[in-house]
Image (cartoon, rainbow, N blue to C red):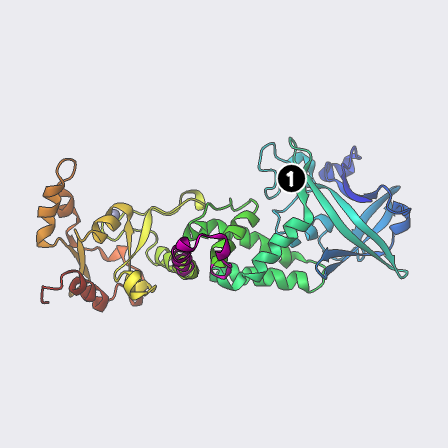
Amino acid sequence: MRISWRSSGNRSSADAKRQGRGEYEFSDQFDGLGPRDVLNRRIIVELGSGLEINTQLEGRWTRSKPTIRRIDSSSRTPLIQLQLAAVLLMPKPIRTDRSWGHYRPVMQDDLYGILHINLNKVELVGTDALRIGIGEVIVGNAMYQAEELRYAERLELVRRCWHRKDAINGEIGGLLAEHERQVRAGGPILERGLEVVKQLQEEMARSAGDFGIVGNAPTGDVLPSLVEAVAIADVSSQPVPLDAIHPEQQELRRRSVRQWAQHAARGAESARFRRQMREAYRSTCVICGLQLPPLGGDGNPGVDAAHILPWRHYDLDVVQNGLCLCKLHHWAFDEGLIEVRKTDSGYAVAVPPEAEERVAAFGAGFSAEFLRQCQGAIQGSRLPENQGNWPSQAYLEERRRAFNPEQSN
Ligand SMILES: [Zn+2]
């Protein structure tokens, strides 16, 4: 048996507004049960791994069809395809086939439909309930009519994200926790459940760059980038199959895994730091004033969160230990060609005496003129609005001491 989308077909003009908005119906047989046998029973979807949702929906004989309806027709309970999509963190499907898109990826908000939900379990429970299990979900748009989504695999990926939610960036972790609560509450999945998926899509599109991964579009499938972010956070807990490695290679492997694990453990914190920096400085380079936010919302920003005291030695992921710099000025700062100092009224960029000589030694294509352009007071408008987030004078001085140990202050 399956639950299938059926085009609404021709309607009277009174229904013109709803034209093209399909319905979901039971079809085919399962173990001797037909659509007529499963009507007027509340539908419980067995999700697997002991999870289930009571949808507050039922099959009802409507216009000579076994259509799926709300049990309480005055409620706003989302219909079956929306509840299922929310559980699986899919973009929002739409019943109006006229609105479906023509391109890949098929699954994008309001541009695709769930065409079939194939059932691998259909069981009548008592006199008023129907318990179903899901095999595959078939999605499509105007051009790609039958893309199969393997339900169990997808749910497993969702569960993996839940499991590691604490290791990921705060907002995303919080949304995953809320999603898990919604699903574990046993249903129905209400409007808020749909909203959480939307927020996850947007949040992941915004912060993918912070994880160093390619993000989803804010209207697209969030699961692949979530899984990747989780994998980064997950590395530290993965066992290393040492017995498969030549003894001489083992120490090497141990070391690289340890370093990778340290890096991964830092992943969430670094992502948060970069994000906070970008927000505090409005993606503006303090030295040249160029504002370079991520392009289109899901690209990478053109500014970096530079550490005043390098994290390798100090591990200080706080905004006061950061400077928002474009790629070029980040490089010059890291190379020690320019430095930032606290002044009475704010901050200024200085060029250390030996920098011009070093630059001259680079030779062609680069001149001291570049350094002179950086020099001078930093405009207050390029700094964070909140003065508490301004670069710490103590860190700036500590950096100068660390970089020029022979110089006294
Ligand atoms: Zn710059």
Q: Which residues are magenta?
A: 236-262
Q: Residue furthest front?
A: 247
Work out whether residue 51 or residue 23 is closer to the camera in this orientation and state it. Answer: 51
Residue 40 in the image: state x and y as whole percent.
Answer: 87, 54
Residue 389 in the image: state x and y as whole percent.
Answer: 31, 65
Which quadrant of the figure contains the N terminus?
top right
Is residue 272 in sight in this rendering? no
Give, as a three-letter code, the residue at label 1.
Tyr
Which quadrant of the figure contains the C terminus?
bottom left
Work out whether residue 43 or residue 358 is closer to the camera in this orientation and state it. Answer: 358
Q: Main secondary structure of the magenta part?
A: helix
Q: Is residue 46 left or right of residue 108?
A: right
Which residue shows up at 65% across the image and 44% down it? 93
Q: Is residue 107 above or below residue 181?
A: above
Which residue shows up at 16% across the image and 51% down it? 337
Residue 246 forms part of the magenta stretch: yes
Residue 70 forms part of the magenta stretch: no
Q: Is residue 147 left or right of residue 133?
A: left
Q: Is residue 375 left or right of residue 11?
A: left
Residue 346 in the image: state x and y as whole percent.
Answer: 19, 62
Which residue shows up at 77% across the image and 41% down it? 4
Q: Secondary structure at mark 1?
A: loop
Q: Confirm or reject: label 1 Cβ below 8 Å from ligand 1.
A: no
Which residue shows up at 74% across the image and 47% down it? 135
Counting other residues with Cα less than 10 Å from the Cα at mark 1, is it few (<14), some (14-19), or many (20 or more)? many
Residue 331 in the image: state x and y as whole percent.
Answer: 24, 48
Q: Which residue is under mark 1?
A: 112
